[in-house]
Each structure stands twice: as C-alpha cells, then as structure tokens.
Amino acid sequence: MSVRRPPGISAAVERAAELLGPAAEHDRPIGELTTYRVGGAAALYCEPSGIAELVRLAQVVGESGVDVLVLGKGSNVLVADAGFAGLCLRLGESFASIAVEGETLRAGGAAFYPVLARRSAAAGLTGLEWAVGIPGSVGGAVRMNAGGHGAETSDRLVSCRIVTLAKGEASDRIVPAFELALSYRHSAIGARDVVTEATYRLERGDSAASAERIAEIVRWRREHQPGGQNAGSVFTNPPDDAAGRLVERAGLKGLRIGSAAVSDKHANFIQADPGGSADDVRRLIDDVRRLVAERLGVELRTELQMVGFEEGS
C-alpha cells in the first residue's frame, strides 16, 4: 500500500519547516510506527535527542502555530490514511534509559514498558510485573494511566518530568503523581505535554517469583488476546462491565469492513490486515459503537487516539 501524504500543506507547516530546516523530515510515514501499522504520513517529523532540542521545538511551535502530535510506541494510536498535517514528535533513544536506585526506578519517556517489567524483576523489585503486557512507552503509559491484570500506572508512579510545548516556551517541570488527576485510562497530561521521565516506587521482592509472574502474564496474553496488527483494547470498559463482552453479546465478533475485522479471539480488539486501511478500521469502530448502542443501549467510548481524521468521519 502506498503511503499518502497529508493534504493541504498549511502556512504553519511551511513556517515550521523553514525554522526547523534539516532537523525535520518531510512526509514521514508514521502509520508504520504504530502497532496498527496502517495509516499515512506526517507533514513534518522530528526525533529530539535531548531537552535542548525540545526547547527548540517549543520555540518553533510557538512561532509557527503548527499542530503537534506527540507519538510514543503508537500502541494506542490510529493514524488516518490521509496522514497528519502537522509536526509529529517522537522522543529519541537517549530518552529510553532505565535506572534502579534502591526501591526507586527511573525511566525515560521513550523506555518500553515491558522492559521496565523485566528490569525491575531482575533487580529483585516487585510491583511492575504487569507492565510486561503493555506494549507502549513510559510517556504514553503515564499519559493514559495504562494498566492491566488488576494494576495500573498510578499504583506505582511517584512523579514525572514534563516538557510542555506551548507559546514558544518549554515549561520543564517535575510533577508529582497526585497532581496528574490520574483515573481509569485518563490523566491531566495534555496533547502538547511531553513526558520525558517517570519515577516509580516499588517494593523488595523475589526475582524468581517476579519472573514467573511475568511469564504467566505473557502466556495469558497469548492465549486470550490476538497478535497481529491491532492496538489492544479499542473501547474502555463501562462501569461494572467489559467492553469485549458487550461487543460479543451484540453479535459483532468477526464483523468486517474492508481490511478491518473485529477479532474472533477477543471482541474488544479490531485487527487490520497487512497493507490495509486505517480508514477501514475507523469505519468499523464507528459501526461497532453504533450497533452496540442500538442493540444493547450502551454507549462505548474509545481508548484510541484518532489522528488526522476529519471531525465526524
């Protein structure tokens, strides 16, 4: 499938491109950077390697007014086939460090959550074993208070460092967890906030027991959740219910639109075919929501961040 470029390059994008010069890639495919692996390109793409480059990006954003997408591992993102007509920012590998000091773990915003699980277990710490099942970065996991297997990020998060790209200035600050308004798949972290580091408080444990718990979670995921091109759970669970159970009860397992299908293995997963269309995935999501509402009277909310789609599409 050919990658489509964002439509209608705006004056803001042109100004940002001028200010960034060779620091920005043009028409960079970003759908392939998500776990759906479908979707189009970003008009501009930058991968800052340090705080100084983030500060420079803040100046560019403020002067140009360009729209910004902060992208992590892309495990909760669907990029439209038309792409994103703005600046996509993704933290470089220098932000992927992990350090253990006593019962404290510090990780960069680009660090991979499953690596946190294994690194903390190897250090004899317990409390993050469940993170092996979260295929996202620290930044994305903190922003959406990611969780699973009876735990969530807010259980262990102490604080995070946030750089805000707005008004031409980079506000670089340490924010304690209690100020983040963390709740089920939600936080107060905004679209132009970049989580560059997070600190977790863990407990002393047994490395062998933690390793076995990690292996158990990996086995469970393989048995109960599909592989392939998806973004995990599409819909948040309504109070006292499970979105997957509702989609299945509505008779929608296996429902297909074009290159997208509701998984036969877990009804809260929507799969994309290799070389498929993000727009097909979006249409199927909308159809599932509509049909569940019509048949069961329940309005489902999506967990996915939809990028580049027209309002109401």
Image (spheres, rainbow, N blue to C red):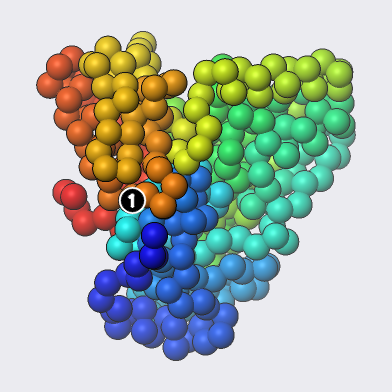
Q: Is residue 255 left or right of residue 129?
A: left
What is the x, y in percent for residue 134? 58, 34
Depth order, front residue of 3/213 = 3
Q: Is residue 5 visible?
A: yes
Q: Is residue 124 left or right of residue 76?
A: right
Mark 1 crowd level (few <14, some 14–19, many ≥20, 10 Å Cα): many
Depth order, front residue of 26/175 = 26
Q: Identify the residue at the far left of this view.
A: 294
Depicted 45 relative to depicted 20: above or below:
above
Q: Residue at x 73, y 17 (%)?
A: 213
Q: Is residue 77 visible?
A: no
Q: Residue at x 65, y 73 (%)?
A: 52
Depicted 148 relative to depicted 158: above or below:
above
Depth order, front residue of 54/271 = 271
Give the amino acid type for the residue marked by disc 1 in the picture: Ser
Q: Residue at x 12, y 21 (%)?
A: 294
Q: Which residue is mark 1?
A: 277
What is the x, y in percent for residue 207? 86, 22
Q: Residue at x 60, y 60 (%)?
A: 91
Q: Quadrant of the N terminus?
A: bottom left
Dot 1: what SS?
Answer: loop
